């Protein structure tokens, strides 16, 4: 058996690797330390190189030689790099116009590493972990990238990977990858619009993706490079620092090492609070020799970080607005990235969206429990599919002529008996496409009217049903405000085709087909007699 | 529930071609997932939907075929082959069909060890008393489970299994009834196959078919005529009492068992011999070979006797020829004889005629003028005629006939010849001398 193609999700904060195991399941690979979500951190102590969780621990004692948050720098000129995000670790410097790091390798020796080299070393560590796990050499990978990665950045990534003998077969967008992994496990019954929100450590990305017949189309994307899990950490750190200062009259923020300690522990506490309702933080000699011990419950945490969570919600709203859609147009929100573990994120979104929208976070039974592994799982799935293709076939399939497809601007569907509209093709359906509608209950002579449909939002004000006036409760439950209910409806637009079907006794099957030139073909077939009526536009 | 409106006017197909479709938008789709790859395939190869669906359907069929069900499971009984086993007394387990109890009634002696273990596990899961009691039955109703356990114990021990298989008459295939019409190979192949399970030797030749060469057929019957069977009948032994209270009785039973076993073995052997004999007698190939042999013999004999036959033929031919010749000769002789007689008679008649002509000649010549000497002349002419031989007679008759005037001279000439040869005394021919 040839060596499998692995899927790599390479994040600023953490990376993960996955592959399709021989049982045809997605296997997320743990590194030798047992981490499935591997921190994207490299640390150097003398001759030794540390990677992953071990390197992350060095951030307290050895921050100058610990490289963090380097992913976004690849392929960018130094002037565009945001140096502030590397404050906690090795400072980013200008190396030949590009980002780089200067680290000491003991006894006064200094090494200047460009970000390309850092990425190479990081990918090499991931590759070694995968080889260790699978037991064969790995030479090919599918890599996920944010939607706003430029071609230069991809080229730089590819070169860095090639330097350690890793051929990147395909770059895929992170939101598509995550959605692919989700859909593989929990299929959507119909065509849907999904917001894929990735809240990582230091940046957030969101995309509105339309799924039409299994094909994904990104309608809009939004990025925030200063929003992420670290904002939550920062709020917590500030809260703990104030508390500590009040108790001990010592400021842990003054001292970089104290701050690093506090940050590391606050992050752990945050993660604990995603699963438990209360957690303790306990740091020996945090500042000025004072120990710190504090117990915090989830409620307090949510209050402290409320501002950040509202930012997350606003971020998602902004991407939907960017796509020109209403909240009602969205069928589901898929949460990925480390922050997705936080229950408050899901509950906030549930509050924000109408009930019809499913929030696919780890709290939802119809979503994975590991939102941080979705991206790499998707890459692995794609890798598994690609293993059946050779390079030429893949290159052919990735031609613009294949990828750039026409999309329907408006819904096309059937007119119902009461002037209602059954959308068959939703807006943003890419074509060529074919879809079958089976109406089993239909009998008699029928008119199959094919129309374009236009959606509109209807707002209704529903007066709350007057509750029986109960003497005791009337004062407390004064929920008497009129409720605004918003509903999405379709109205009939242009008439396209009408077909008359006669003498139906056991239902009809209507096949809609749009070819690559946009020609609409509708075939109505009597399920019993098998006779068909065709119309073409 | 979505319903279509009823057809009010008589429309079959009406296309609103004037309808202005909204402007289409070109967007990149995400190159991920199988649906994208399908889309790419369709686009690149220009497949229509129906073509593509067909290709995909073919692929799906293959994957279903490849899905593996344990092949052993298919060979096990899905239901208990014999329902009476459920109420069979476990103390009489020896009379129960152990293979049926294990769900192996189709496999029987062919079941491998792993199959037996699998089947046992399956049966235990189904018939364990704990399981049964869960559905209301009492824990005492474990008779069938005991039989299963006994069966497992018997069938997993090679010695015990061979003993049980020896007496597994269910697995015996009976030969076809005599007098029935049947295909020899179809009817007898399973019989020999079931008998072959007792063979000590392997490989076991198969019965073959109508085209099997003579040598193989002979090998087949040779094998069966010299069949070496390991079949034993210990399983049918009467239980030997294991208490040592009555040693004599024990020995008696053992002896009886041994005798019974030997008897059964002998009976079995003779059964097999008879079986093989019958098969041989019915085997169309054997008949064919015999006939062929006979024909060949005759042919050989025919060839061998070719020389003698040719001789005899030649002899007969010669005989026939000789006979024909003899006949022809006889015919010829007879005809010749007749001819001779005829000519003789003719000659006689001619002679008479000549004699008469000669005798009458003097008379015709008026006795040469000597009528007074007529008597003497006639007497002497008579004497001449009687004395001359035939040639002289013919010559004189010719002479006289030719010229009657020369009769006297002719007679004188002959009288001269006669007297000179002293055949007639001259005195008696005085007239002509």
Image: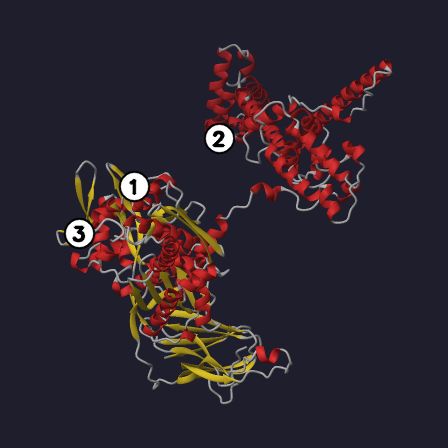
Q: Is mark 2 on a helix, strand or loop?
A: helix
Pick the front one: A483 or B305: A483
Which residue lies most toward the front here?
A249
Image position, residue B108 (x, y; %): 66, 35
Q: Mark 3 points at which residue?
A: A93
Q: How crowded is mark 3: few (under 14 residues within 10 Å), some or many (20 or more)?
A: some
Q: Name the residue under label 1.
A: A50
Q: Split into 4 quadrants, where in the image is the C terminus of chain A?
A: bottom left
Same subunit, tags 1 and 3: yes
Scheme of image coloration: secondary structure
- What number is the disc on residue B401? 2
Image position, residue A48 (x, y; %): 26, 37
Q: What element carries label 3?
A: strand
Which residue lies most toward the top here?
B422
Label 3 and label 2: CA atoms lie apart by 184 Å
Picture layout, residue A399 above or below residue A523:
above
How many marks the image carries: the answer is 3
Picture layout, residue B386 above or below residue B45:
above
Image position, residue A49 (x, y; %): 27, 40
The chain ID associated with circle 2 is: B
């Amino acid at each position: 058996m040839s060596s499998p193609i692995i899927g790599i999700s390479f994040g600023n904060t953490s990376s993960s690797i996955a592959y399709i195991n021989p049982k045809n399941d997605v296997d997320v690979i743990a590194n030798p330390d047992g981490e499935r979500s591997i921190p994207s951190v490299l640390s150097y102590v003398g001759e030794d190189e540390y990677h992953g969780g071990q390197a992350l621990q060095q951030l307290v004692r050895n921050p100058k030689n610990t490289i963090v948050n380097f992913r976004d720098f690849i392929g960018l000129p130094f002037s565009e790099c945001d140096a502030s995000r590397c404050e906690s670790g090795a400072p980013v410097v200008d190396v030949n116009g590009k980002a780089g790091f200067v680290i000491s390798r003991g006894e006064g020796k200094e090494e200047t590493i460009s970000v390309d080299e850092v990425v190479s070393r990081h990918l090499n560590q991931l590759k070694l972990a995968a080889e260790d796990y699978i037991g064969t050499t790995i030479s090919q990978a599918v890599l996920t990238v944010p939607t706003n990665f430029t071609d230069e950045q991809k080229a730089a990534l590819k070169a860095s990977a090639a330097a350690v003998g890793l051929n990147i077969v395909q770059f895929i967008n992170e939101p598509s990858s995550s959605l692919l992994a989700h859909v593989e496990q929990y299929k959507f019954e119909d065509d849907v619009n999904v917001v894929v929100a990735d809240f990582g450590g230091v940046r957030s990305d969101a995309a509105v993706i339309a799924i039409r017949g299994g094909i994904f189309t990104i309608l809009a994307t939004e990025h925030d490079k200063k929003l992420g899990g670290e904002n939550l950490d920062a709020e917590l750190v500030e809260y703990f620092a104030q508390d500590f200062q009040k108790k001990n009259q010592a400021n842990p923020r003054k001292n970089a090492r104290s701050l690093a300690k506090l940050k590391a522990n606050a992050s752990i506490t945050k993660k604990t609070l995603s699963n438990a309702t209360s957690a303790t933080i306990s740091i020996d000699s945090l500042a000025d020799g004072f120990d710190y011990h504090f117990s915090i419950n989830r409620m307090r945490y949510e209050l402290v970080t409320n501002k950040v969570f509202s930012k997350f919600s606003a971020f998602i709203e902004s991407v939907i607005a960017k796509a020109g859609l209403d909240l009602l147009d969205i069928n589901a929100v898929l949460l990925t990235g480390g922050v997705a573990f936080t229950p408050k994120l899901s509950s906030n979104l549930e509050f924000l969206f109408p009930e019809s929208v499913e929030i696919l976070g780890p709290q939802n039974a119809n979503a994975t429990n590991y939102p941080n592994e979705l991206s790499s799982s998707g890459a692995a799935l794609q890798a598994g599919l690609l293993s059946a293709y050779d390079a030429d076939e893949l290159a052919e399939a990735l031609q613009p002529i294949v990828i750039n497809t026409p999309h329907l601007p408006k819904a096309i569907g059937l007119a119902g008996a009461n002037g209602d509209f059954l959308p068959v093709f939703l807006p943003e359906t890419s074509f060529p496409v074919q879809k079958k509608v089976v109406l089993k209950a239909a009998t008699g002579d029928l008119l199959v009217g094919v129309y374009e449909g236009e959606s509109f939002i209807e707002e209704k004000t529903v007066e709350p049903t007057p509750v029986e006036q109960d003497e005791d409760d009337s004062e407390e439950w004064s929920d008497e405000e009129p409720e605004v209910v918003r509903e999405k409806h379709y109205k009939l637009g242009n008439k396209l085709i009408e077909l008359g079907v006669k003498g139906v006794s056991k239902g009809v099957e209507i096949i809609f087909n749009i070819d690559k030139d946009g020609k609409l073909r509708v075939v109505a077939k009597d399920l019993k007699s098998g006779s068909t009526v065709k119309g073409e536009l | 529930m979505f319903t279509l409106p009823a057809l009010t006017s008589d429309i079959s197909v009406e296309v609103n071609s004037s309808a202005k479709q909204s402007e289409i938008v070109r967007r990149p789709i995400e190159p991920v997932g199988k649906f994208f790859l399908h889309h790419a395939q369709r686009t690149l190869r220009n497949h229509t939907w129906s073509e593509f669906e067909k290709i995909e359907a073919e692929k799906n069929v293959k994957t279903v075929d490849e899905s593996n069900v344990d092949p052993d499971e298919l060979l096990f009984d899905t239901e208990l082959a014999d329902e009476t086993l459920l109420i069979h007394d476990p103390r009489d387990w020896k009379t129960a069909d152990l293979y049926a109890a294990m769900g192996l009634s189709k496999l029987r002696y062919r079941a491998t060890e792993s199959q037996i273990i699998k089947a046992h596990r399956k049966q235990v899961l189904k018939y364990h008393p704990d399981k049964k009691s869960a559905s209301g039955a009492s824990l005492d109703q474990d008779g069938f489970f005991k039989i299963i356990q006994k069966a497992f114990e018997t069938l997993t021990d090679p010695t015990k299994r061979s003993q049980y298989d020896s007496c597994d008459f269910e697995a015996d295939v009976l030969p076809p009834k005599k007098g029935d019409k049947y295909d020899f190979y179809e009817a007898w192949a399973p019989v020999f196959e079931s008998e072959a399970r007792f063979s000590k030797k392997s490989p076991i030749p198969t019965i073959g078919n109508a085209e099997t060469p003579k040598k193989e057929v002979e090998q087949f019957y040779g094998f069966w005529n010299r069949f070496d069977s390991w079949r034993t009948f210990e399983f049918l032994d009467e239980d030997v009492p294991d208490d040592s209270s009555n040693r004599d009785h024990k020995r008696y039973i053992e002896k009886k068992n041994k005798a019974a076993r030997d008897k059964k073995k002998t009976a079995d052997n003779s059964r097999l011999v008879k079986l093989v004999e019958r098969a041989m007698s019915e085997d169309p190939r054997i008949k064919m070979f015999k006939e062929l042999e006979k024909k060949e013999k005759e042919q050989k004999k025919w060839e061998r006797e070719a020389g003698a036959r040719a001789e005899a033929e030649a002899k007969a031919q010669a005989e026939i020829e000789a006979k024909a010749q003899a006949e022809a000769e006889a015919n010829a002789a007879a005809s010749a004889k007749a001819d001779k007689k005829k000519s003789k008679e003719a000659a006689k008649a001619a002679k008479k005629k000549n004699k008469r002509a000669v005798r009458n000649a003097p008379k015709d010549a008026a006795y040469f003028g000597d009528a007074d000497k007529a008597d003497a002349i006639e007497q002497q002419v008579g004497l001449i005629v009687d004395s001359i031989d035939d040639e002289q007679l013919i010559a004189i008759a010719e002479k006289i006939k030719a010229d009657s005037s020369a009769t006297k001279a002719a007679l004188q000439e002959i009288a001269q010849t006669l007297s000179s040869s002293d055949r007639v005394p001259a005195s008696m021919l005085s007239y002509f001398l």
